[in-house]
Amino acid sequence: MKKLLMLVLALSFGCGETPIGMPEEGFEVLHERALEDAAPIADINALVEGNTGFAINLYNQMPLNENIVLSPFSVSRTFSWFQNGERLQDVFEGLFGYLPDSDATKTAFNSLGVKLMERDESEERMSIFESRDIQWLDKSRYTDEARPDGYDNVHTFDFAGDPEYAREVINTWIEERSRGLLTDFLDPGLINPDTVSVTTNTIFFVGNWVHDYVERSINFSGRRGTKSVAGFGNETEYQHHVGEDYTMVRIPYTGEYSMVAVMPEDFETFRSSLNFRGFRSILSTSSRGLVRLSIPNIKTESQPDLVKAIDTLRENGGYNTTDTITGEYMETYVHKVVINADKDGTTAAAATVVIGYDNNAPEPVEPRVINFDKPFIYFIIDDATKSILFVGQFVE
């Protein structure tokens, strides 16, 4: 992970204006524009609230008994390209939690993207979050004059003439934007002569823990019984909560990001009842205190069935189940996520604190011991906006 971090820093600040992953020929740029922070804060807050509700709803469609991870932010961001005018407004507003006005949604997403990616670059060990968007349109159907309203970073490609070359270009773009974590993203055949558009969002995150950690073994009780798994931990102060229904620890990254790890007493019941209000209650119901923490390493690759999940949400909500999401073409959705969290995924300043008491002083406070030794849910969030960047579960 340390080698990856150095590579990230080099790529993040060494890129020119030409989009990486772009071929030298075979495509045309219709429009590119940098993100701008121009939305009212009320619109950004409303979008975050809607996205959070969608994130929880999407997560609840995932399998119960396997390790998974997904990025609801990336899914929601990608579909926001298709909220134009009044077309399928009830789908986008009701399902994804977008704003009533499509232009306001796009502006708010752009502002949110700026806020998520802007951090104090003076930090010695920065955490990095990047979100990048691009859309490829069929060259025979779209010209600069016919470019859909509100579409930025739009390119054209001759899908009918060379669909396999187009697939390779798209896969290369995704691989480079993900710093090599997502390879061969689109399978052969997904891009074919009937392709009219490919809309893509990538997000990339490297989080440096605020604290330092040591390796720890954990006797983890999953659905297949109890076994020893590799993990990490330390003893320091955390925002945490220990209650009848769940135990939570908020593990901070530099740059105002956090991993919020939630270990329910009854995993299935807790997950099925989790909603927006419950998530916000988890964030607000905590206190700071000394914790002896142990948590498993997380190494998960997921390709959730996004088509099935969204179709189920649409059916449950009654949102235009006879139409496709974009309202124009047949669609397929592909979503893949990779996460790796362990002690070596962090770079933290080491500190030793020795507190001395005289004989009449209070006894030192004993740390609360929190071992994540049974299935738990984790969220990676932006502390300032409370946006959910990733959500996953560790059950085995």
Image (tube, grey):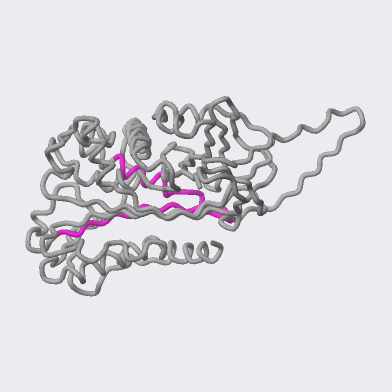
Residue 344: within the magenta? Answer: no
- Residue at 55% across / 48% down in the picture? 254
Q: Can residue 122 be seen in this view?
A: no
Instruction: Give left or right: position of 357 versus 342.
Output: right
Residue ID at (68%, 40%): 292
Q: Which of 295 and 24 is in front in this view?
A: 295
Task: Give the residue displayed 58% in from the left and 37% down from the top.
Answer: 249
Q: Nearer the viewer, residue 196 or 305?
A: 305
Q: How many labels does the image show?
A: 0
Quadrant location of residue 221? Answer: top right
**Residue that sits furthest to the right in the current view:** 359
Q: Judge from the rendering whether residue 43 lies leftward or rightward of residue 363; answer left or right.
A: left
The picture places residue 245, in percent across and down from the top left corner, at: 53, 27
Q: Position of residue 113 (x, y in %)?
A: 36, 46
Q: From which residue to which does the magenta span run?
A: 108-137
| Above/below status of 129 relative to 279 | below
Residue displayed at 23% across by 30% down: 317
- How far from the left and from the top, in percent, is residue 186? 27, 62
Toward the viewer: 204 or 309? 309
Whether residue 265 is situated above or below residue 16 in the rendered picture: above
Measured from the top left, where is residue 377 in percent x and y? 48, 40
| Left or right side of 315 for 118 | right
On screen, residue 109 versus residue 339, left or right, reads left
